Image (cartoon, coloured by chain):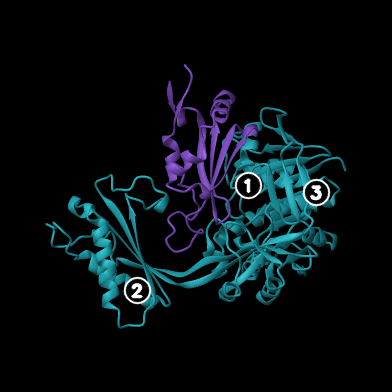
Amino acid sequence: MDEFRILSATAILGYGFPISSFEAGLARKPHLIAVDAGSTDPGPYYLGAGVSFTDRDAVKRDLELMLKAGIPAGIPIVIGTAGGSGGDAHLAWNQAIIEEIAKEQGLHFNMAVIHAEIPKDDVLKKLKDGHVHPLPPAKQLEAEDLEQTVSVVAQMGIEPIIKALDAGAQVVLAGRCYDPAVFAAPAVRAGFDKGLAVHLGKILECASIAATPGSGSDCMFGYLRSDHFDVEPLNDIRQCTPVSVAAHTLYEKTDPYILPGPGGHLDLRQCRFEPVTDRITRVSGSKYVNAAQYTVKLEGAKRIGFRTVSIAGARDPILLEQIDEIIEGVTERVKDNFKDRDIKYELLFTIYGRDGVMGSLEPVRKVAGHEIGIVIEAVSDTQAHADTICAAARSTMLHYGYTGRRATAGNLAFPYSPSDFHAGEVYVFRVYHLMDVDDPCAWFPMDMVEV
Amino acid sequence: MTKNITELTNIIRSKNSGPYELTMDLMFNSAENYHYVSENNIINTDLICKLYRITPDQVIGIVHFEPAYAIKVTIVRPICSGDLGETDVYGAQQHAPLLSIQVDMPD
């Protein structure tokens, strides 16, 4: 085989793609249809709560098109980081969608479901043996953090996916997965260079984001050959230029030359980007360097309570000048009011129009405009306690008597009734560490399912 | 002649690089503008510290990437993404102070 062709459906499964782009991809006779389904960008809630940040109907729509095209044509379909976060709950959610489509469309195939959730006891044992390391600026993991973490997932590399394809899977549904692996694994299995395959995977996992104009909801096509690869957008309005493709290498990464992943890193210091046509760009010189010790990245979130928020605005210029004093006064009043009750809580005020977007990084340290938006946020051990603290802060702030006040009828403008909202469970990332492993497949058990 | 950075770039953006880091990309609109800003070390640690009110130990790196005519700045997130007090989970709106950079260019 001298060319391995890959159709990337969309940047994240469920973000959608035009059918015309997808058909243009099929016309190029791909050896693989693959898609990345996850990200940590939407924050810790989705991993912790076991729910997807993508919509079920949207995911089903994308998968239906991929399965209906790929299964009859015998093209393998590989999906990574199922359900957005790749834990067992996310995997089961995505598996049910695939089985529903197969039933409705009368499709039959072998599907490998690869788990990526690591039992906490095993992580603890690895931690005690010194095989779990922090990824700076994160701190070392403590046993206590682990205890409070709901579940831990690990990012698999290409090896478990290759194993699944070797076992005869036509569809591979992987839990938490290094984003490029779903594209790179089948290509490496077909005998292509790992550096080029992983770099191509890095570009394809974001689909058309590397084109200009970029899009997170359009297809992209890759041609991998012995000493280079070409990328081509499948929508006539887009181009892949050397600058647009090189620019993508920077996206969401700290160092564009050295890109670490499971078991090693991609070295792009000798990488070249050249135009083939005005729409196709050629990339060469990407190298993969294996690490002495294979590591996988662990991710875990813990629940810290429940959140209630109240949204309001303020327009009074005298109030705007006193906003710090008011927040301090309200905080003190609420604390005093519940000092005899056993409620542990955090009370926060976000002031839009001052530093609501940038917080401590904001260089402008005053209210510059004529109005502000206020989000009052209470987090406590139960939703009822969060409600209590939020309501107390909201009513206290509404009638707080600040210096120089003229408007004695109320300090806040509420856009809604009710003014307070349940934001539900609150999770935070607590595990973001590397774990040494001896066998890249051992922690990622596979079920082979006949669909 | 003093030029605003927006006259020299096509893209100025910010995003999380994992939950503990914030990374900013400045992509220049020509090889000349990239080389001028890069060779004169205009995007430096002192400037970033001033723009973001941080100390030098919070600047993880400033990398010059010629293939994309880009300079990348990565800093420690004030808090881990989604922790209590978060204001920008994706880190997508932290680039704004960069837009105020003024560059002295030869006439």
Q: Is residue A212 left or right of residue A325?
A: right
Q: Is residue A87 left or right of residue B73?
A: right
Q: Chain of mark 2?
A: A
Labels 3 and 2 within one chain: yes
Q: Could you tell me which secondary element the residue under label 2 belongs to?
A: helix
| Amino acid type assigned to the residue bearing label 2 in the image | Asp
Q: Quadrant of the C terminus of chain A?
A: bottom right
| Amino acid type assigned to the residue bearing label 3 in the image | Ala
Per the model, the C-alpha gap separating discs 3 and 1 is 18 Å
Q: Do we see residue A30 in this rendering?
A: no
Q: Nearer the viewer, residue A123 or A154?
A: A123
Residue drawn at 26 percent across, 67 percent down: A330
Residue where numbered disc 3 is placed: A187
- Disc on res. A206: 1
Quadrant in the rendering for residue A223: top right
Nearer to us: label 3 or label 2: 2
Q: Nearer the viewer, residue B58 or A117?
A: B58
Task: Tell me residue A4's x, y (percent).
Answer: 80, 44
Per the model, the C-alpha gap separating discs 2 and 1 is 40 Å
Q: Quadrant of the N terminus of chain A?
A: top right
Task: Tell me residue A229's x, y (percent).
Answer: 76, 38
Label 2 Cα crowd, 10 Å radius (few <14 / some 14-19 / many 20+): many
Residue where numbered disc 2 is placed: A387
Q: Do we see residue A43 in this rendering?
A: yes
Tell me which numbered mark, 3 or 1, is placed earlier along the sequence: 3
| Amino acid type assigned to the residue bearing label 1 in the image | Cys
